Every structure is written in C-alpha cells, then in structure tokens.
Amino acid sequence: MSLLEQPTTTVSISQFGGINNFYMEAIHWQWILLIVSSLVFFLISPFAKTTDQFFKAINKNKAPNALVLTGSLIISWIFAKSITNAANLGLEFGILGGIAYAGYYFSFAVAGVFIYQLRVKGGYNSIHEFLTSKFGKNAMALFSILILIRLFNEIWSNTMVIGSYFGPAGSTPYFAAILVFTTLTLAYSLKGGMSSSLFTDAIQMILFSVLLLIILFQVFSIGDFTASAVVSSSTWSFELGLNLLFAALLQCFSYPFHDPVLTDRGFITEPKVMRKSFFFASILGVLCIILFSIIGVYAKANGIQGDAAFEVGKAFGVFTLLVINFIMITSAASTIDSTFSSFSKLISIDLKLGNTVTIGRLSMVLLAVLGTIPVFLNAEILSATTISGTMVIGLTPVFLFWNIKVPRISFYLSVLGGLFFGFALVFDYFPNELVLTKGKFADLLWVNVWGIGTCILLYLLPKWIKR
C-alpha cells in the first residue's frame, strides 16, 4: 500500500527510560504549545457567514491567491504521519528514502494538469460533476465511498501521532491529548470552514518552514555531519529505496484524485492560478519532505535507532524535542482542519444533502466524533479500515483518458480491478513470481505495475468490444 496511509510507529515521552523532571518539563511545554496555538488559531480565524466563504474560501468576491493556495496545498499534505515516515525512511535508506517518499508529492503536478483540463476543456466544476456526467450517479456514489473512508482515516491516523507524544498508547495523557487536540482544531474549523483552513494553513506553513530550518541548523552545526554525508548516505538500488520511488511515481496518476483535500483546492481559484499553484506545491512539497528526511539520515549516520524524529529530538534535548513536537502539532492540525472542510463540502455540495453553512458545520462535528472512535479500538481494526494507494489505482485510466468516450461499465471494471490488486497486496496474495525486483517495497512496486496495466486494459476493453 502507499506509505501515505500506513500508520506510523507511535512514540511517547515514556521512551526516555524513566520520566524525570527534565522530561516532565517537556510534557508541560507540549501542553502549552498545543492549547495556546489552537486557541490563537481560533481567535484569528475568519468567521464564515456565507456558503461561498465556508465552502470555497471566497471573501469579498475574491478567491485565494496563488501564494495562499500553494502554501495550503503543501502543508495540508505534510501531515504528522507523513513527516514521521519521511524521517524513518531517511534512517532506513539514507537520502534515497526521503527522495522516494517525496515522489508522492509529484501528485500535485499531475492533479494540476488534469484538473486544469477538466475545468477548461471539459467545463466541469468538480470531480463529482465530471464522474456523474460521464459515468452516472452510481459511479459517483462508489467514488464518494472511497473518499469518505479516506477522510475518516485522516482523523484518527494523525491524532494518534499527536497523542503518542504526550504518553504511551492507551494512557490517560495519550487520550486526553487526542481529545483536546481534535476539539480545538474542530472549533476553529467550525468558525470559518475552508476560509479558516486556508488562513491557518498559511500560518502553519510559515511555522513549519521556520521550525524545520531550526532543526536542520542544529543537525549540521553539531559534530561532523555535512551535506556530503547526506549525498553519500544511500546506495541507489531497488533493494534500498528505488522500489518505493517508482511505486510512488506510478501512484501519482491515481492517488491525488481520491483525496478531496487536494482536489477541492483545484476548483476554488482561476484555472491558470490553480495550475501554477499546483506546480509550485509539487516542487516545494518534494523539497520539504527531502529536507525533513535529513533528520533520519543524521540518525543513521550516528547509529540512532527507533523513531528517527523523536530520537534525534531526544538526543538534542528538550528544546529540539519541543520544536519537532510543534511541527507535528501544526502539520496534523493543517491536515485535520482541511479534512473537516473537505468532508463538509462533500456532504453539503457534492452529495447535495444541504447547501448551507449549518449542514457543513454539523458534518464537521459528525466526522470529528466518528473519526475519533477508532482511537479507542485495537490496531487490527485500524489497519482494516485503510484504503491504500494501490486500491485506487483503478482511477488512473479514468483521469488519464478523461476525454475518451467509453461505456459506463469501464469505470466499474477499472476501479474494482484496482481494489482487487489493493486487497491482494494487503493480504499478501500477490504471486511472488510476478515480483521482478528484490528488497523492501518490491511487492508494492510490482502490484502497481501489473495492476495499473490491468486497469487500463479493463477500462478500454468495453470500448474495443463495442467497436
């Protein structure tokens, strides 16, 4: 499956090997950072009165500019589990691990190209409108189920990472941090919807950049760790990272389209502004992930084991640990507030269940409750709810050949074919004989290679038969 959905290794302050006054102080400051930052976001967030303000972030008849949209795209995808994975891949594979993971962020460029075509050449105003027009309401309903599950997963998978920095999984501090964080993020999301999301995203992007630079300064200023050590930290082979890189690039043609957090932002500005923002977001997103993975490369060079970001923070002391924790808080908050706004739009506008601000706000509350319930369940249940990047590879031909007329059954054959390959990967049913490289993520790569080829064939086959 895609690493973008895999649960990260949870960590906690208890891993320090005994809580003393030094680390009790860290926990104390973590709570202050969490509560104060969330309250500030609530106070400064705009209050949405109209549906355009709440669902589209249009204020005084002006859509968000390219700079705001670019920052929002990047920070909404640099979520807590994402940067944790990036650091851990840097620890495991060196800088190639970070580059491989950054491959997923070319999704912005791919989405920007196809959404531009859908809007300018097709005249569509949303992904749902495109699917309904071309494949019917049932196809749109199936697609909606996939993205509903994704949005549901975004809540618990990010809040669990936050909770793990306050206490061991299952402890009172762990659950308390999750509930407080979710409630405070919900509060400012309710206030402004998409307007709040984009406004706070801009601030969170600045915070992320500054905090990341602080960490990198410390990494390169201590000891003999240099840029040349980063460059030479990897062996470029399939076994040591290339499997993941090529799998990520393949999934870029389907993965972004089942993420409304990304696609919703493709329809709120002028098409040319949108396309430019998506291209810049792709470049800067790749850069951010690679830079954050250097933390893992540092850990590898110094023989540090465990969760890379957490262990490096611990090694540098309370200040660095708090900086890393604050990055987790801001990145998770940006993802969750975007998830709330996308869910409200999906329910209110895309599924046409009530185009009002009230319905949008009630939808957010519903998602906050449902998305938090899995936190109190076991890991097996959480894994079972995940819709992986491989499971949606059936969307590849749907958007790659968006302007080719095909029978409606093509959509179902391709999407269901992708689900088949996704489940084959998750439950380890894919034949080893079809895996043509070795090493970690080899099965991920070749399931996607064979799966995407099969889905394209299934998509075009009805057209050939009909002809």
Image: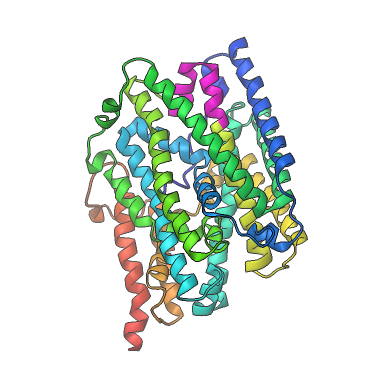
Q: Position of residue 158 (x, y in %)?
A: 57, 41
Q: Is residue 324 magenta?
A: yes
Q: Is residue 313 above or below residue 390?
A: above
In the shown orientation, is residue 82 left or right of residue 192?
left
In the shown orientation, is residue 35 left or right of residue 221?
right
Q: Is residue 451 magenta?
A: no
Q: Is residue 39 above or below residue 339?
A: above
Dominant secondary structure (helix, strand or loop) of the stretch shown in magenta: helix
Residue 85 placement: quadrant: top left
Residue in the picture at 49% in, 54% down:
387
Please tell me which residue lies in front, 31 or 425. Answer: 31
Q: Position of residue 307 (x, y in %)?
A: 45, 28
Q: Is residue 191 above or below residue 299?
A: below
Q: Position of residue 1 (x, y in %)?
A: 41, 50
Residue 322 placement: quadrant: top right
Q: Which residues are magenta?
A: 306-326
Please tell me which residue lies in front, 420 or 230. Answer: 230
Q: Quadrant of the C terminus?
A: bottom left
Q: Is residue 175 above or below residue 263?
A: above
In the shown orientation, is residue 106 left or right of residue 363?
left
Residue in the picture at 30% in, 51% down:
246
Let me know if residue 230 appears in the view.
Answer: yes
